[in-house]
Amino acid sequence: MFLRPENWSALAPTERRQARYASWTSTEGRGFTTPQAEETYRRHTRRFVDVINLEVPDAVPIVPFIGDYVLRYTGLTPWEAMYAYEKYKPAYRKFSSDFGLDYTVFCGGFNPGKCFDILDLKTYSWPGRGNHPKDRSYQTLEGEFMKADEYDALIADPEGFYLRTVVPRAMGALAGLGSLSTSWATMEIPAAPFFLLPFGLPEGQKALKALLEAGEAALKWVTELEDLEGGILRERGLPRLPGGFTKAPFDWIGDTVRGTQGILTDMYRRPEKLLEALDRLVPLAVQLADTGASAGNNPFVFIPLHKGADDFMSDKNFRRFYWPSYLKVIHGLIGEGLVPFQFVEGRYNNRLDVIADSGIPPRSTFWSFDQIDMVQAKKKIGSWAAIGGNVQGSLLYAGTPAQVADAVKKLIDECGYNGGYALSTAVVLDNTTPENLHAMIDTAKEYGRYSGRTAER
């Protein structure tokens, strides 16, 4: 856990970030089993910090986004990843070792399926749930869990509205939470019993029982996750990337609250209410990121950008609806000494100028791109921010090892000069071949070592 120094409130954002870096890169108390593991941890954490600082590291960091390919490679099903931890853990260890990963990255579909079963989660479908096959990964189920006429309630009290309105709709076992009054009722003795009353009713007791059981299942999952990633850390010295998690406010509403159709309709029928709601979610997005990153003592906050791509909305709408509230989240994270680790999904070629002209402080963010002109990204953003990507999923699936190796070398040549670049897949990787993934990683390790060729242009 990251412990804030006593003078935290007096520190500038850059000083807060340095304090988080110092805590993350420290090897003290991590229980390494060998001196080699400790040295690996020290080198790999320093390498990524150097990249964010736009300094020339010892080598280009290799940070692939790995999804279900962990399962395909090791012969597991998505159901086993979500329920049979005793099978998944050795499988991921094998995958990490076989491919020589530099960091413990995304663990495929390793999610606690039992929690979702208990809660009767309605925003996703997952292996074994209803008619969902056990050999298919989880999928989002879009729906209007918030109605179009409920923006005022969301704006007035985002946390309370989500708990008492959205959660009962999105989680069948927690319908009893819909009867809760504000927790402020407990501040006076005469009113306190009325706050507690819903928990005495059958639906409220059902919700409490579900929360207890789901909490136990979540604790079991976290324990297994720590055993997996903590073991790899202690034995091999591989840091985890990234740490915390949050989302852009537009994606919060558009993904699983209003749904895509709902939020697109709102952009035209109630734009001012939508904009006001997006701004109200900014502090919650920052708080979510800070809580996770601080608990894991990892300053890098993963942010998947879902609905801001060129192909999703016009540049005019991006500038009005998506970017302003998200930019406030970026500044909020930077203010807390955190580093936005942005997974920029889709095409963002038309967005580069907007990002470049936003006044984001230098050496404070990381942008991993998907479908983009990386030369332009390096030119417009790379002078003040670290960038990553973009080995294409289609190439890793259908190309040859030689083609993959050529693509990796080209990316390093075009984006790795003067530092500030990390190699990663353009997408979360579900399909490839062992030969192609080895070609990506091994080429980057050999070709990405800094020398006069890669350090300057």
Image (tube, helix red, strand yellow):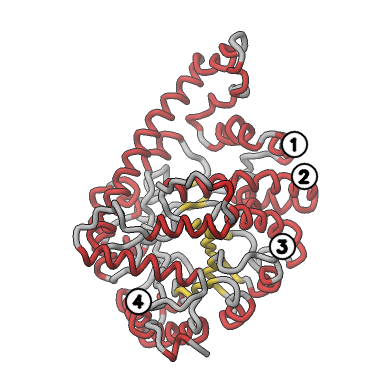
Residue at numbered disc 2: 273
Residue 10 at x, y percent in the picture? 58, 49
Q: Are marks 1 and 2 in contact (CB under 8 Å)?
A: yes
Residue identified by numbered label 4: 441
Q: Nearer the viewer, residue 1 or 132?
A: 1
Q: How far apart are the alpha carbons under marks 2 and 3?
A: 16 Å
Which percent across, then down, holds residue 279?
A: 70, 48
Query: Tags 4 and 2 in contact by the CB under 8 Å rule?
Result: no
The residue labelled by disc 1 is: 152
- x, y percentage for residue 108? 37, 58
Residue nearest the observer in this picture, 227 or 433 = 227
Q: Residue type at mark 1: give it.
A: Asp
Q: Helix, strand, or loop for circle 2?
A: helix
Amino acid type at image mark 4: Ile
N-terminal label among 1 and 2:
1
Q: Which mark is residue 318?
A: 3
Q: Which element is circle 4 on?
A: helix
- Residue 281 in view: yes
Amino acid carrying mark 2 in the image: Lys
188 in relation to 428, above or below: above
Q: Earlier in the sequence, mark 3 or mark 4?
A: 3
Label 1 to label 2: alpha-carbon separation: 8 Å
